[in-house]
Amino acid sequence: MDLTSTPIGDFLDALASKSPTPGGGSVAALSGAMAAALMSMVAEVTLPKKKYKVYEAELRDLAERSKRRILRFRELMQEDVKAFDAVIEAMRLPKDTPEQAKVREERLREALLGAADVPRRVGMEALEMLREMQGLHGKLYKFVVSDLAVAASMARAAVEGAAMNMIVNASSLKDEAIVEEAMAMVREAEGLARSVFEAVKGRLVG
């Protein structure tokens, strides 16, 4: 299944099936893509409003950057499936002789590192979005600032989902550095998303 072009209904059916892919890693990337799409939307809706003319260049840049991010996240959805398949393929290698066992161990480690790197890229991209959201609430048309808060929630979900996928692969590698990096990403995402939520709430209700 090509997740870069699969209709959402087909994706959800595949997600609900007994197949292990697509799974949580692809969902984390999809969460990032939806956050990016909302970021583009809030910029596009605000751009025609004369009141926000002073932010035009910044908002145009945000819209274009967000559209590029959507494509990257869609690609990462597919890459996550490929990375998982590589792990399964390595696990199925024979290990009857010392030579076979060594080859299998090396291939499995390489595959697990790859499987941890894909969600890392998802998390870093989503984290960068959350950083860009700081202070944005005051530059947007009032009736789309709630969408900014939803984008922050989806970006946070992308980071947390990506972090857990980093951790599950790190546990097999016994790599504490990956776990520590994942948890640092989660902590930063939590703070940034909460900041956006509170800022949006403050603008809407004071």
Image (spheres, rainbow, N blue to C red):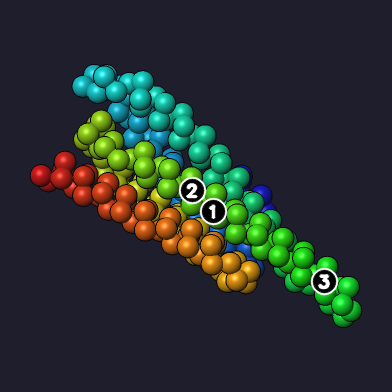
User: Please, what is the three-letter code of the amino acid marked with disc 3?
Assistant: Lys
Q: Is residue 89 visible?
A: no
Separation of disc 3 and disc 1 at Cα? 27 Å
Q: Amino acid at mark 2?
A: Met
- Return the x and y of residue 190 as percentages of the image width and height: 33, 56
Task: Determine whether label 2 and label 1 are within 8 Å by CB.
Answer: yes
Q: Tell me if mark 2 has few (under 14), some (14-19) or many (20+) residues whose alpha carbon lies within 10 angstroms of its own.
A: some
Per the image, the residue denoted by label 1 is 120
Residue at 36 percent of width and 20 percent of height: 57
Q: Residue flagged by tag 1: what amino acid is it?
A: Arg
Residue 199 at x, y percent in the picture: 21, 45
The CA distance from mark 2 to mark 1 is 6 Å
Q: Residue at x 83, y 68 (%)?
A: 103
- Residue located at (22% from left, 44% from top): 200
Q: What residue did someone put label 3 on?
A: 102
Q: Which quarter shows the N terminus? A: bottom right
